[in-house]
């Protein structure tokens, strides 16, 4: 282990040693079980459990019996017990039972944070990634934050790849944005680490966590009222659970009874929530107001005579699309970090952590202004990190959707995302009012349930992707045309959710395995009798 040659006794001698050890263990355990059954929790129990645990600290029954015996015996057994547990941790420094017992012993002793820090420091010298020692230090040592930060800095000076020390450091810092002076110190430490070893991921992960400390609260992005469907729909900036009373809707100052339900039909946090409108709301004008009680968000729309729908949408904040937690940070700090990443890439062009961090920083600054550099970073990252191509492809998909959402000169309500190599479809909450969605010739394996939040969607082109089924697709009340050409759809039953789309009139399935099936036309006519299906 660790490059040290371990000398073993001859096979016969080793076998006899193991047999003798097993015999003593069985005798000790049999005696302990017998004494437990007779209620004899005495000094012999302490002695026997000590013999077993000294050789194997992971026997939970022995720790339990030992604690019960110690409590009954009384006396000042704390110092000796701490020494005993220390010896057991020398046998197995990551023994859950031994660490639990040590915490129990300390509850019977006066606090001594300095001794606990020294004890943990000895174990961390032997193994800097002993997570038990780190957790014990946080729980029992009670050191001042600055002293603990200095301790982590000392360990990181020895080894910048000590992820446990980075993690402990992050836990010490107060939640929320850091003061400018502290942030500068942390960034200087990170830069020293990444320029020392650009390929190690520990400091890069810490940097991204350091910057993402100001998660913006959820807020309302859009509101859509649809008289034909009898639905009021809202979109949030991130998934939320709408508890009773947390999202209030009113019609001319009269509260709507609700309840709110997720647009995808699944009982889990969602960006899209729906509420039924009262049946009598058929003659506008009507004023609808929605308020989110867990934040300052509120919005309203007015249905005028002759209208069947009305909507409101918040202006899109470009900096919050790709890395929303960092988009609220000081742009000057983000620009400095981006420049440092560029300088490092000149020396280490295949540094995975640097490429990912720079891509995220560019997205947080202004994805439109850095469009080409952002795409170049992500292409280089896919080449440098082939084992995580799927993750990088999803990041690239988010960047492409963000750029399209922000594209100047785009037709209102249209998103054109053809030929973007999309593997996922994020940021739909920012496209809640889209009417045309072009997704042809991408790498999508399924349609996300979040599409159920696009209540105005009329035309959806998903041709030449990798979609095998539409099962799980929520109803789309205004969908009129769907193109699925060239997808590996084999069974008519995979299209069953389309029966819940009342306006669907045209469906294209050319080039699918289903289109080649002899019985396809009859099956589809039965499933979708009012839809014109093109199989060729």
Image (cartoon, rainbow, N blue to C red):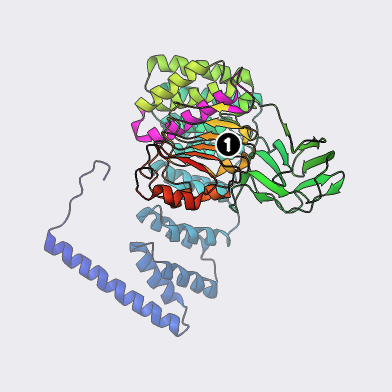
User: What is the x, y in percent for residue 452?
Assistant: 59, 43
* Quadrant assignment, res 307: top right
Residue that mark 1 sits on: 147
x 69%, y 41%: residue: 234
| Residue closer to the observer: 360 or 451 | 451
Can residue 123 be found in the magenta stretch? no
Label 1 residue SS = helix
Write the start and end of the magenta stretch as one range.
385-414
x 53%, y 58%: residue: 103
User: What is the x, y in percent for residue 42?
Assistant: 46, 78
| Residue closer to the observer: 284 or 437 | 284
x 55%, y 31%: residue: 437
In the displayed structure, does residue 263 sit left or right of residue 395? right
In the displayed structure, does residue 159 sit left or right of residue 112? left
* Quadrant assignment, res 283: top right
Q: Quadrant of the N terminus?
A: top left
Q: Is residue 447 above or below residue 395?
A: below
The kind of secondary structure the magenta stretch mainly shows is helix
Can residue 386 be found in the magenta stretch? yes
Q: Is residue 93 above or below residue 200?
A: below
Are there few (<14), some (14-19), or many (20+) residues within 10 Å of tag 1?
A: few
User: What is the x, y in percent for residue 106?
Assistant: 55, 58
Q: Quadrant of the C terminus?
A: top left
| Residue closer to the observer: 149 or 50 | 149
| Residue closer to the observer: 274 or 355 | 274
Q: Is residue 140 above or below residue 534?
A: below
Q: Residue furthest right?
A: 253
User: What is the x, y in percent for residue 349?
Assistant: 38, 18
**Residue 198 appears in the picture as rendered:** no
x 83%, y 45%: residue: 251
């Amino acid at each position: 282990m660790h490059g040290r040659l371990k000398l073993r006794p001859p096979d016969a001698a080793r076998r006899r040693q193991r047999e003798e050890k097993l015999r003593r263990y069985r005798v000790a355990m049999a005696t302990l079980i017998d004494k437990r059954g007779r209620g004899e929790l005495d000094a012999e129990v302490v002695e026997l459990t000590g013999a077993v645990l000294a050789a194997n600290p992971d026997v939970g029954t022995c720790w339990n019996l030992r604690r019960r015996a110690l409590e009954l015996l009384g006396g000042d057994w704390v110092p000796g017990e701490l020494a005993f547990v220390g010896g057991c941790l020398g046998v197995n420094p990551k023994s859950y039972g031994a660490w639990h017992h040590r915490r129990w012993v300390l509850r019977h002793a006066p606090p001594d944070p300095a001794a606990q820090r020294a004890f943990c420091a000895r174990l961390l010298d032997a193994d800097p990634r002993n997570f038990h020692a780190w957790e014990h230090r946080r729980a029992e040592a009670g050191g001042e934050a600055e002293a603990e930060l200095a301790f982590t800095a000392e360990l990181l000076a020895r080894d910048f790849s000590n992820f446990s020390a980075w993690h402990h450091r992050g836990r010490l810092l107060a939640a929320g944005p850091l003061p400018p002076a502290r942030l500068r110190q942390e960034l200087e430490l990170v830069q020293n680490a990444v320029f020392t070893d650009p390929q190690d991921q520990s400091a890069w992960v810490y940097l991204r966590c350091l910057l993402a400390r100001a998660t913006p609260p959820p807020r309302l992005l859009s509101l859509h009222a649809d008289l034909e469907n009898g639905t009021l729909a809202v979109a949030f900036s991130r998934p939320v659970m709408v508890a009773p009373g947390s999202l209030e809707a009113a019609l001319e100052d009269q509260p709507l009874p609700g309840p709110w339900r997720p647009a995808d039909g699944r009982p889990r946090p969602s960006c899209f929530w729906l509420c039924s409108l009262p049946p009598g709301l058929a003659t506008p004008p009507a004023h609808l107001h929605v308020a989110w009680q867990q934040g300052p968000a509120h919005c309203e729309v007015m249905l005028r005579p002759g209208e069947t729908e009305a909507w409101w949408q918040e202006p899109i904040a470009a900096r919050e699309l790709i890395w929303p937690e960092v988009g609220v940070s000081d742009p000057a700090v983000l620009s400095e970090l981006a420049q440092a990443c560029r300088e490092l890439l000149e020396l280490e062009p295949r540094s995975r952590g640097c490429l990912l961090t720079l891509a995220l920083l560019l997205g947080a600054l202004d994805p439109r202004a850095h469009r080409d550099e952002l795409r170049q970073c992500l292409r280089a990252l896919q080449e440098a990190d082939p084992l995580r191509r799927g993750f990088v492809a999803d990041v690239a998909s988010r960047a492409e959707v963000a750029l399209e959402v922000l594209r100047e000169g785009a037709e209102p309500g249209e998103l054109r995302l053809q030929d973007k190599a999309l593997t996922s479809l994020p940021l739909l909450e920012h496209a809640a009012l889209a009417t045309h969605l072009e997704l042809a010739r991408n790498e999508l394996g399924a349609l996300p349930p979040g599409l159920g939040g696009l209540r105005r969607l009329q035309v959806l082109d998903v041709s030449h992707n990798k979609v095998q089924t539409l099962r799980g697709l929520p109803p789309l009340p205004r969908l009129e045309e769907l193109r699925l050409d060239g997808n590996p759809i084999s069974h008519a039953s995979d299209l069953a959710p389309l029966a819940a789309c009342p306006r669907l009139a045209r469906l294209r399935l050319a080039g699918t395995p289903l289109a080649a099936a002899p019985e396809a036309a009859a099956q589809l006519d039965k499933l979708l009798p009012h839809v014109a299906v093109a199989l060729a």
